[in-house]
Image (cartoon, rainbow, N blue to C red):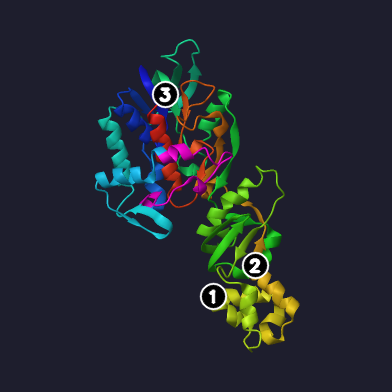
C-alpha cells in the first residue's frame, strides 16, 4: 500500500507529527513495534506526565548545535501545547520550576494525541515490526519502501520518531540511529542523560557513612549549576540536581576535555568562608553549626571524614585559619569524581543522536536525503529535567508535520 507519509514510532513526537500531517490532508501511516501507544508518556511524571514547562528556551537544551532547537520551539511553543491541553479540558497543575503535570493521568495526553490522529484520518500499524527500509532514488512519489511484518508499504516522506536508548525495558532501540547511518547521516554517540552518577570504589568507600542523606544543594559542572535535592546513595549520586548536571558531565567527552569532577555546594546561597568567620569567636563545634543547614547525621559524618577528631572535638574558635579556609572551600565546592553513570536503564533520556548538522532546523528533513525526517529524542537535542524533552517532541513533531 502507498501512503504520502509513513512515521516510524508512535510516541510523543510521532503522534504529534501524524496528527499535523493528516490534518493537512496527507495520507499517513503510523507504525510502532509496541501494542501500547505512548508508553513513555504513560510512565512519565509518576503516571501524571510532566508534559511541558512554563518557561522554555534553547538554553534548556544540550546539543552539538545549541541553536538548532530555536526554530521549532518558537514555531510551536509550550503555550501552543498548553492551549491543546486546555481545549481538551485536561486538568493540570504547576509544580516547582514551572513544571506542568496532569492532575489525574498521563493517559489523558495519550488519548488527546490518539484522537487527533484518528480525526485526521491517520492509519495505525501496531504492533508492527519494521524489517528494512529501501530508498528508490528515481521515484519521487514512491521514494521509500518500508518492509514490515504486516506487509510492505511505500511513501513519499519517511519520518523517524523512534526515540533514544533510555529505558530499554519499554522497548528502546537503536533503530533510528542505524537508519540514519544507512543513509549516510552522522550520529553523535548516544549516552545516558538525566541519569544517576556512579562513583568509583575508591571515591565511594570513604563516603559510605553518608549514604541515604538527602541534601538541599547545588550540583555544578563548569558553568552549569542546579539547586535541587542531592541524594547520596550506596552506588553514588542521585536526586534531581544530579540528574540535571549528569548531562553536562557527559558532554565533556564530546569536547575532548579533561575529565573533571562534579562539585556539590552544600551551602547554596551562603559564602561558607564568611559564615564560618562570623562564628569564629564562638565555642560551637562545626558539626553542630552545620546542622543548621544540613541533616545532623550527615554534618557529623562529613566533618569526621574531612577533619577527623579535630573537627569533632574542638570548637571553631580553636581551629586554624588554614583549616577553616579548606573547610569553607569544600563546603561550597565539594568535588566528587564520577566513574560513569548507572546507564540507559536508569536514564530519563538520551544524550546525542542524529546530528543536527545534517538536518534542517526549519523542517527536520535531512539536508542531503530528500523526504527523510528525524524528530524527537532520536535527534541530538536533549532537554533538562522538567518537561523540556516532551516539549521538544511536540515542537519537532509539529514542525515536521507541516512539511512532510
Magenta span contains residue 7: no
> How many neighbours does mark 3 have within 10 angstroms: few (below 14), some (14-19), or many (20 or more)?
few
Please provide the residue range marked out in magenta. Answer: 47-74
How many badges with numbers are in the image?
A: 3
Question: Which is more N-terminal, label 2 or label 1?
Answer: 2
Query: Gap in Å between the C-alphas at discs 2 and 3?
Result: 52 Å
Residue at the top extreme, as displayed? 138
Provide the secondary structure element on which disc 1 rests: loop
Query: Gap in Å between the C-alphas at discs 3 and 1?
Result: 59 Å
Mark seen at residue 293 = 1
Question: Which is more N-terminal, label 1 or label 3?
Answer: 3
> How many neighbours does mark 1 have within 10 angstroms: few (below 14), some (14-19), or many (20 or more)?
some
User: From this viewpoint, is residue 328 visible?
Assistant: yes
Residue positioned 40% across, 52% down in the render: 45
Q: Identify the residue under disc 2.
A: 207
Place residue 5 in its image quadrant: top left
Question: Closest to the observer: 93 or 32?
Answer: 93
Q: Nearer the viewer, mark 1 or mark 2?
A: 1
Mark seen at residue 149 = 3
Provide the secondary structure element on which disc 3 rests: loop
Amino acid at each position: 500500500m502507498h501512503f504520502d507519509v509513513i512515521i516510524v514510532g508512535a510516541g510523543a513526537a510521532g503522534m504529534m507529527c501524524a496528527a499535523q500531517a493528516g490534518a493537512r490532508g496527507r495520507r499517513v501511516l503510523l507504525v510502532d513495534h509496541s501494542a501500547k501507544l505512548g508508553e513513555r508518556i504513560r510512565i512519565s511524571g509518576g503516571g501524571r506526565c510532566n508534559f511541558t514547562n512554563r518557561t522554555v528556551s534553547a538554553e534548556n537544551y544540550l546539543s552539538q548545535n545549541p541553536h538548532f532547537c530555536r526554530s521549532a520551539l518558537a514555531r510551536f511553543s509550550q503555550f501552543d501545547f498548553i492551549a491543546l491541553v486546555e481545549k481538551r479540558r485536561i486538568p493540570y497543575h504547576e509544580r516547582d520550576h514551572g513544571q506542568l503535570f496532569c492532575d489525574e493521568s498521563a493517559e489523558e495526553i495519550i488519548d488527546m494525541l490518539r484522537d487527533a490522529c484518528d480525526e485526521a484520518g491517520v492509519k495505525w500499524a501496531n504492533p508492527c515490526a519494521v524489517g528494512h527500509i529501501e530508498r528508490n532514488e528515481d521515484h519521487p512519489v514512491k521514494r521509500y519502501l518500508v518492509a514490515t511484518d504486516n506487509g510492505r508499504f511505500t511513501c513519499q516522506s519517511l519520518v523517524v520518531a523512534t526515540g533514544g536508548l533510555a529505558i530499554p525495558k519499554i522497548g528502546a532501540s537503536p533503530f533510528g540511529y542505524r537508519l540514519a547511518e544507512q543513509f549516510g547521516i552522522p550520529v553523535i554517540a548516544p549516552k545516558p542523560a538525566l541519569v544517576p552518577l556512579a562513583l568509583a570504589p575508591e571515591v565511594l568507600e570513604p563516603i559510605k557513612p553518608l549514604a541515604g542523606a538527602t541534601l538541599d544543594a547545588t550540583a555544578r559542572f563548569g558553568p552549569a549549576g542546579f539547586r535541587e535535592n542531592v541524594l547520596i546513595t550506596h552506588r553514588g549520586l542521585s536526586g534531581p540536581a544530579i540528574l540535571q548536571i549528569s548531562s553536562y558531565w557527559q558532554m565533556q567527552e564530546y569536547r575532548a576535555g579533561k575529565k573533571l569532577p562534579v562539585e556539590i555546594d552544600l551551602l547554596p546561597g551562603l559564602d561558607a568562608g564568611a559564615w564560618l568567620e562570623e562564628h569564629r569567636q564562638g565555642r560551637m563545634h562545626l558539626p553542630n553549626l552545620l546542622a543548621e543547614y544540613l541533616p545532623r547525621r550527615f554534618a557529623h559524618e562529613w566533618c569526621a571524614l574531612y577533619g577527623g577528631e579535630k573537627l569533632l572535638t574542638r570548637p571553631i574558635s580553636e581551629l586554624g585559619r588554614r583549616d577553616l579556609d579548606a573547610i569553607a572551600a569544600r563546603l561550597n565546592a565539594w568535588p566528587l569524581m564520577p566513574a560513569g553513570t548507572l546507564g540507559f536503564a536508569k536514564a530519563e533520556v538520551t544524550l546525542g543522536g542524529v546530528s543536527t548538522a545534517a538536518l534542517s532546523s526549519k523542517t527536520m528533513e535531512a539536508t542531503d536525503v530528500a523526504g527523510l525526517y528525524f524528530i524527537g529524542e532520536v535527534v541530538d537535542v536533549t532537554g533538562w529535567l522538567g518537561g523540556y524533552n516532551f516539549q521538544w517532541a511536540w515542537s519537532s513533531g509539529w514542525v515536521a508535520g507541516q512539511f512532510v
